[in-house]
Image (cartoon, rainbow, N blue to C red):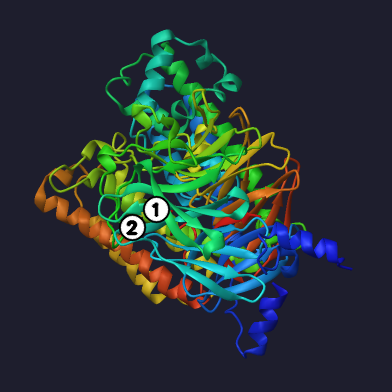
Amino acid sequence: MTTRRGFLASLLAAGAAPHVGWASVGNPAFLAAAREKDGSFALYGLSGTGSATFRVPMPARGHAGAGHPRRAEAVAFARRPGTFALVLDCARGEILHRLTPPVGRQFNGHGVFAEGGALLFTSEQASDTSEGAIGCWDVNAGYARIGDMPTFGIGPHDLRLMPDGEALIVANGGIATDPSDRSKLNIPTMQSNLTYLNLSGAVLEQVEMEADLRRNSIRHLAVRTDGLVGFAMQWQGEPGVAPPLLGLHHQGAAPVLALAPLADERAMQGYAGSVAFSGDGSELAITSPRGGRLHRFSDEGVFLGVMPRSDICGLATLGRGYLASDGLGGLFSVSPERVDALNRFDCAWDNHIVAL
Amino acid sequence: MKLLATLALTLGFAAPALAGVNEVLDRHILPGVTGFSAATEALAQEAEKDCRPEALRPAFQQTFDAWMPVADLRLGPSEAMALSIAFWPDPRGFTPRMLGGLIGQEDPVAGDVADYAEVSIAARGLFALEMLIYDAEFSGYAVDSYICQLVTTIAVDLNRQAEALAATWKNGFAVTLRSAGEAGNTTFLTKDEADRAIYTQILSSLEFTADRRLGLPMGTFDRPRPARAEARRSGRSLRNVVLASEAAHGLAMALADWDLPETDMALVRVLEAAERIEHPGFQGVTDPQRRLRIEVLQQSVRGLHVAIETEIGRKLGIAPGFNAQDGD
């Protein structure tokens, strides 16, 4: 039963706005975009046991999303080159706001809330040069665009808030793309980097790959509560080379690259699609839909094992281990000891699972 | 999946019955890994008798022939084991480098088969053997030399790998495939997923043949790369394309229990295109006229891919992987 005091407190917590919280949509633990059997698209809320708590239709294929820390609102980003992002009311299934990047910019598929949900940051690039930028949006002003800041790299993809809430980390993938068809323009000279920024846009630290791994595009990120960053990469060099696809970085230290045994590494086909830490933080995993496998590593980069699964890609922290999703509709709980199939939907889960 | 089956019945159609996974296992994969295991045993015995190149080459060729029906499988135990049996492509030249290192130091690991299982996979398997018994840099060795001992060890190690591969297929992954959709099977949540996995293997194999076995030596018109042809030292590049195409066709036949006339015709076209190529190691890629014939072969392999997509994939409603196709 809601007391008046409790009601007021929750109102205050929600920025004194009449928005409903995640409890109204079944307290989902995750967001995941999907393509339905009939070819339409949707955004799902998922529980920790793999059941759907809500489903909102989407007008086009999504990539990743961001969940507001309190309100039952999700921002779903279109696939690159992203011309829109949608703020969805997950309770009513309505589109609250349609965000468009400024002229000459495009969204790059990822975004993150900060300042307790008052700010939204979006990963963007200049359409003509692929120079990276972070768009800043005032959530309480109806997602008004309030500015942007450079990412100090080309083609940024994933971005995350650091655990102190006062810094962002951006994966500058390094790949310049054609604004219309996403074809890659600068592979011979590309240079990827990881960039830490404070919320005003000042660079705190930047990490680049060594020369022989210059064509390893850093694309996805996971951050542990102590600030350890796991970064997943996609190899743009010669096929058949088995480069590391996972790196670990602590601010102020050199990055550690994590390799599986050669035959396993090669089976990943130079591609990691998602990365997440396990629930207890002692290890992390990457997925390769091309190789149809999930690789687990210790937090020091030691290979721990493989889980084969066709078209696996989405990955998030669940329980002591992980939640993984695939293009066949499967949802799995993966722990160091075992793999359990939680559910199988009649849809294709898209690249990412976003933890709420 | 029960729900899917129910839905299919309600709508008045049923997915076409597949000869499916059992046929694929019983007619193709299990005989394939068993045959390969037997061939490697003969090769190892031959090497123990006489480890010199001339003596070993016939058994080596037979072993490679026996490998091809299962060479491109990247499923179950084959996923990780295939690469230590056949380490190719090798764009950075790991195989000659690793072998050169062992030989230069006369590393005692060449005298111990059990230890040899721990060396880099680039120095194991068919391509390491090929390098030693065909490449002029190595193949002049004498009967009591270090290389001769190394060759024997690699042959025996290959036999052990082949036996392990066959056993793991029979006792492990065949069971996983046959029990698709049953409780506790987290690899294949439905029967359809197992069919899909086999189907995907067929297409990936043909893509590998077109893009790598043919595409690597072809390079570009201005820069052909004949040295990148698979197994060119043993003159098997063309033969491997033919055997890999036949293997893909054989898997398709086993997977479907209906006629595949377009697929049959497409295989005939591959064989016809292959017959017109003179050099078994694709060394004609540098000559415009002969290069054209290799391009025709590549197109015919892609034609086989299309035929299988049409006659099996479309019929079963299997589309390529949603995420695998879409890098981001």
Dot 2, crowdedness within 10 Å: few (<14), some or many (≥20)?
A: many
Q: Quadrant of residue B5?
A: bottom right
Q: CA distance from mark 1 to mark 2?
A: 7 Å
Q: Is residue B265 above or below residue A284?
A: below
Residue type at mark 2?
A: Arg
Is residue B319 visible in the rendered image? The answer is: yes
Q: Is residue A294 above or below residue B136?
A: below
Q: Are marks 1 and 2 in contact (CB under 8 Å)?
A: yes
Kindly state the secondary structure of the residue where label 1 is placed. Answer: strand
Q: Is residue B162 above or below residue A287?
A: above
In the picture, the disc for residue A124 is 1
Is residue B38 visible in the rendered image? The answer is: no
Q: Residue at x 21, y 56 (%)?
A: B295
Q: Position of residue A135 (x, y in %)?
A: 43, 53
From the image, which quarter does the N terminus of chain A lie in?
bottom right
Q: Chain of mark 1?
A: A
Q: Position of residue B318 (x, y in %)?
A: 51, 70
From the image, which quarter does the C terminus of chain A lie in?
bottom right
Dot 1, crowdedness within 10 Å: few (<14), some or many (≥20)?
A: many
Q: Position of residue A185 (x, y in %)?
A: 25, 49
Q: Residue at x 67, y 73 (%)?
A: A91
Q: Quadrant of residue A81?
A: bottom left
Do badges 1 and 2 share one subunit?
Answer: yes
Residue type at mark 1?
A: Glu
Q: Which of the marked residues, 1 or 2, is nearer the chain's N terminus?
A: 2
Q: Residue at x 10, y 53 (%)?
A: B289
In-front residue for pair A236/B134: A236
For label 2, the residue is: A105
Please state if A219 lies on the left or on the right of A155 as rendered. right
In-front residue for pair B172/A184: A184
Kindly state the secondary structure of the residue where label 2 is placed. Answer: strand
In the displayed image of the protein, which residue is found farthest to the right?
A: A1
